[in-house]
Amino acid sequence: MPIFKTSNRRTFLAGIGATGTILALPSAGFSLTKADAEKLINRLSDDIFKVINSGKSGPAMYKDFDRIFGKYAAVNAIARTCLGPPWRGATPAQQKAYTAAFREYLSRKYGKRFREFIGSEINVVSARAVKSGVLVKSLVTFKGSAPFIVEWQVFERNGKQQMFDLYIEGISMIKTEREEVGSMLDRSGGKVAKLITRLKAAG
């Protein structure tokens, strides 16, 4: 199944962040099967493939990535996890605004990265149960370059199957974005309102 294209995957990996370990998922139900998780990731990959090969401009493409992110990812859980303890000190209005700004930021950032991968191939090769979910392993192949592993962490909550984290050769999106958001919050003097403004301009 074709999805990405670039001759230099290191550009993508460097843009994502530092290597991390798999983080624990929020508590979830146990009805999710490995086959369910594989089907979800195949659908997600198909949608990403359609967007990056659509020929759309950057801003239009990022809107499509935002739609995909909202459709397949546990947006609220990811946003809360990446903000960490300051989430509890934010007002409901700030939490809502932060989540929306974070979602747009992530769509721009990863949209730019995936855009570099037009023409390569990704194939789901296996899935295994992990704490509160399933980790789906896929293999990305570039022309003239060795293949590498992308893993997708999937959970089920309230009957809905969603992606919680993404790993590119062990690089965790959650861990990376916790560090990025923490750094932006520090530069914002610990003020969530100022962090929101920074997120709107980042990515």
Image (cartoon, rainbow, N blue to C red):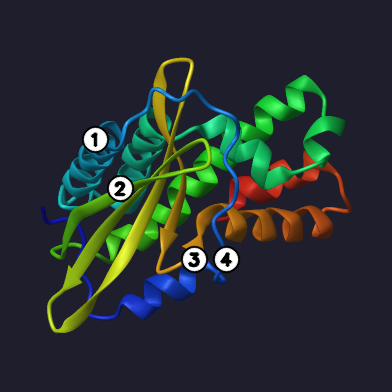
Element at label 4: loop
Q: Residues within 10 Å of mark 4 (few under 14, many from 20)?
A: some
N-terminal of the pair, mark 2 or mark 1, is 1
Which residue is more in the foreground, 48 or 27? 27
N-terminal of the pair, mark 4 or mark 1, is 4
- Residue 142: x %, y % from top left: 17, 73
Element at label 1: helix
What is the C-alpha distance between the residues marked 2 and 1?
Answer: 8 Å
Mark seen at residue 9? none
Q: Which residue is mark 4?
A: 20
Amino acid beneath label 3:
Ile
What is the C-alpha distance between the residues marked 2 and 4?
Answer: 20 Å
Q: Residue at x 68, y 60 (%)?
A: 179
Q: Residue at x 66, y 42 (%)?
A: 81
N-terminal of the pair, mark 2 or mark 3, is 2
- Residue 98: x %, y % from top left: 67, 35
Element at label 3: strand
Q: Are marks 2 and 1 in contact (CB under 8 Å)?
A: yes
What is the C-alpha distance between the residues marked 2 and 3?
Answer: 18 Å
Location of residue 80 by image quarter: top right
Amino acid beneath label 1:
Ala
Front label number (2 vs 4): 2
- Residue 94: x %, y % from top left: 75, 28
Q: Which residue is mark 2?
A: 127
Amino acid beneath label 4:
Gly
Q: Give the answer, above or below, for where 76 lies relative to 19.
A: above
Q: Which residue is mark 3?
A: 171
Q: Is residue 109 left or right of residue 8?
A: right
N-terminal of the pair, mark 4 or mark 3, is 4
Q: Which residue is mark 1?
A: 35
